Image (tube, grey):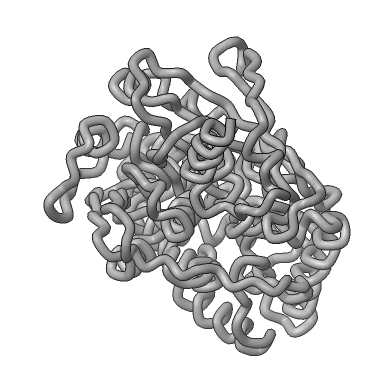
Amino acid sequence: MKTTLAVATALTVALAGALPAAATTDRYLQQELSWTSCSGGKLECANVTAPLDWNNPGRDITVAISRLQGKNAKNVLFTNPGGPGVAGLDMPLMFLDKKALRDSHDIIGIDVRGTGRSTSLGCGGQTGLGGELDTRDRSAGNIDLLLDSGRLINRYCQVRSGELGRFVNTEQTVKDLDLIRTLLKAEKINYLGYSAGTWLGAHYATYFPQRVGRFVLDSNVDFTDSWQRSLYGQAESFELRFRADFLPWLAKNDAVYHQGKTAEEARRNYERLRARSKDKATALDDAIFRAMYSNASFPGLGALLRDQLAGLTGDSTPDSEPATLRATMCNDTPWQGDEDAHLRTAEDRGSRYPLAGWALTKQHCFGWERPPLTLKKPTGRGVPPVLMVQNEHDPATGIKEAERAHRGFAGSRMLRVTGPGGHGVYATGNPCVDAKVEAFLVDERVPAHDESCSGMPLP
């Protein structure tokens, strides 16, 4: 009996890896997953019980997960759509037509803590506070309102989030992921994370390097630095995508959209329309931001501009997603500098990259009471090679951010996608990218050096 107990204990410890080894975590590590049909019968879903605070287990939260079982699965593939805080439970459905990937993996979707069907945060619908304010209005009164609205959103979200809000951070989330790995009885995991999911994947690899199989980081934030640095970098990358891809495409299709025969003429027409539509200026900005993510959205945006914003609608993102984004960004890394320094950055970015630069004014963590937390810094040391996939013209996670992360993460390989391209690459229709990613994930072939693929043509 003692021998059997010793073997069982050793197995549990081996699977649990670096999770807290105290008896207080035993009930989490020993729970059994109960799978039920979900997503119209296409997936299986289960709930995982995790501690609210991994450093002081006691109170519980629920983390919802899903599974797309592979016919000949030898590995598990954890997926994350980014955000941080976008619900990921249905994400395995993205890969229904990826036969090689599907057959070789159990593909796992996860609503990370704070969002979706997991124990969720909420801001009471107040994340749009101040949304009617035009960020290009640089009068002293409007700037004060922009700063104040951001601060009020932060305080409102933190109060509404209660105790949970302090524990929605990357350190807690990577420990949730490793609990899920343990419950799935997987020695290692493969991983596919997009956007902010690259931050999560790089940090999981840093906390649990011995559990890392093949990690694909697609559309990369600079996960070696801070969320603030990544946020500040977006102004340049959105401007690049707008000017290098969308405006030339719009001019090329002037016979359809009537916005000008050159990119510069199309830009001036956009500026005139925005100036005439003061009450809709912010909604127009948001519509352009969303359209920059995908080439397939260009025709819809062209029609919106042609039709003088007829049919313009606002964002309908579930409340838990921006709440989790705000909590994660403001909890994970300190916000450097005071409001004056932040305003100087917004002025600099706005003057050079007006599409998104001025919007930085209300995007900050002032007013958020950050808990004591120092994340481990991702360096790549001791981690198997990861594959970073990156569009050159990605608007949300720019190429400069990705290159900094690549340089700072030892052993990483970059698959650079040249030319036009939005946000998110694998499984969006680029056969060159799909083949190279699947060679890495399925065939376990690590590129000897950085590689490239051509981007897909615009519509």
Q: Quadrant of the N terminus?
A: top right
Tell which of 449 and 125 is nearer to you.
449
Q: Residue at x 86, y 57 (%)?
A: 162
Q: Position of residue 385 (x, y in %)?
A: 26, 53
Q: Position of residue 155 (x, y in %)?
A: 83, 67
In this view, the residue farthest toward the top is: 41
User: Left of 22 or right of it: where is 144?
Assistant: right
Q: Quadrant of the C terminus?
A: top left
Work out whether 288 lies above or below 349.
above
The image quadrant of residue 146 is bottom right
Q: Residue at x 32, y 43 (%)?
A: 214
The image quadrant of residue 456 is top left
Q: Residue at x 35, y 41 (%)?
A: 425
Q: Position of residue 429 (x, y in %)?
A: 31, 30
Tell which of 355 and 456 is nearer to you.
456
Q: Position of residue 116 (x, y in %)?
A: 69, 37
Note whether residue 317 is visible.
no
Note whether residue 3 is visible.
yes
Work out whether 369 lies above or below 27.
below
